[in-house]
Image (tube, rainbow, N blue to C red):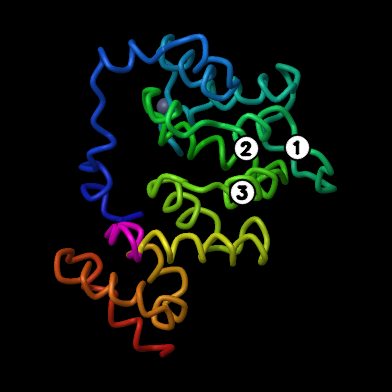
Amino acid sequence: MSTNPHHRRNHPEDIESAPRIRAAETLFSRANQFIAAVWNASDVGMCMTPGCSECGALEFRRALATLDGLSPDAPLTTPIALLPEAPGPLAVALATVDFGLLRLTPRWYDALDIALFYVRDHGELRFVLDEWVRRDAVPTRVLDLVLFRHVRYGFPDARLADLWIDVCLDAAASTGDECLVESLILTCPERVGADPRAFRAAMEAANHSACVRAIVGRLGECA
Ligand SMILES: [Zn+2]
């Protein structure tokens, strides 16, 4: 995930075509509560900008809390005293989400960004990542989002962060995705340096991307 906003905006997966989206809006895609919430938020024009300076995406976060079974007047940011033993409805919906269907929803990436912070605040990110990390395929942008926002800071825990980095190193080596390579170098330069395939992908990415070139020297720090 690039810290450069232009880098983020120009990704081909961000470009949505309205007819394709409408065609995909089936009962099946709405069967997942999170996907349904994103469609609904889009239909009524809710703000889904993470960290929006005007509204904090409050209405969408409230919709997620309602889906999660919170009462309408419950505070959205109550610190949790104990980690829950079982995932709530939103964490279950995220853990079981079909990424193919999710990626057909408008603003899916921003919506997912907000939702992952919600479940992390509720101590439930580990339930979601525990499922995702075992899947055969997780979209590169999702790998990168979780890496950059959460795993990089040690969330949800050391074991899952380690597993997530393993999956990201594999994906970076096979796709050469520059954003993912950049996030990996920022997160764990020593792991990239120690993984020959990922290291090669980083060198290749540095040839094409000024962002990667600017930080690729860090790989030498821990080698
Ligand atoms: Zn807003």
In the rendering, at what x and y percent does residue 70 appear? Answer: 74, 23
The answer to whether residue 159 is above or below residue 23 is below
Residue underneath mark 3? 129
Quadrant showing the C terminus: bottom left
Residue at 28% x, 46% y: name it.
8
- Distance between the alpha carbons at the discs numbered 1 and 3: 12 Å
Is the residue under label 1 in contact with that under label 2 (CB below 8 Å)?
yes
Q: Which residues are magenta?
A: 173-181
> Can you tell which mark lies on residue 173?
none
Give the number of the mark in front: 2 or 1: 2
Disc on res. 87:
1
What's under tag 2, amino acid-wise? Ala
Taking 74 as reference, is 204 above or below it? below
**Under tag 2, what secondary structure?**
helix
Q: Mark 3, residues whose alpha carbon is within 10 Å: few (<14), some, or many (≥20)?
A: many
* Residue lying at 65% horizontally and 56% vertically, measured from the top left: 156
Classify mark 1: residues with Cα within 10 Å, few (<14), some (14-19) or many (20+): many
In the displayed structure, does residue 214 sit left or right of residue 125?
A: left
State yes or no: Cβ of the residue under disc 3 lies below 8 Å from any atom of ligand 1. no
| Crowd band around label 2 with a 10 angstrom C-alpha radius: few (<14), some (14–19), many (20+) | some
Q: What is the quadrant of the N terminus in the image?
A: bottom left
Q: Main secondary structure of the magenta part?
A: helix
Question: Do the numbered discs 2 and 3 sit on residues whose CB atoms are within 8 Å?
Answer: no
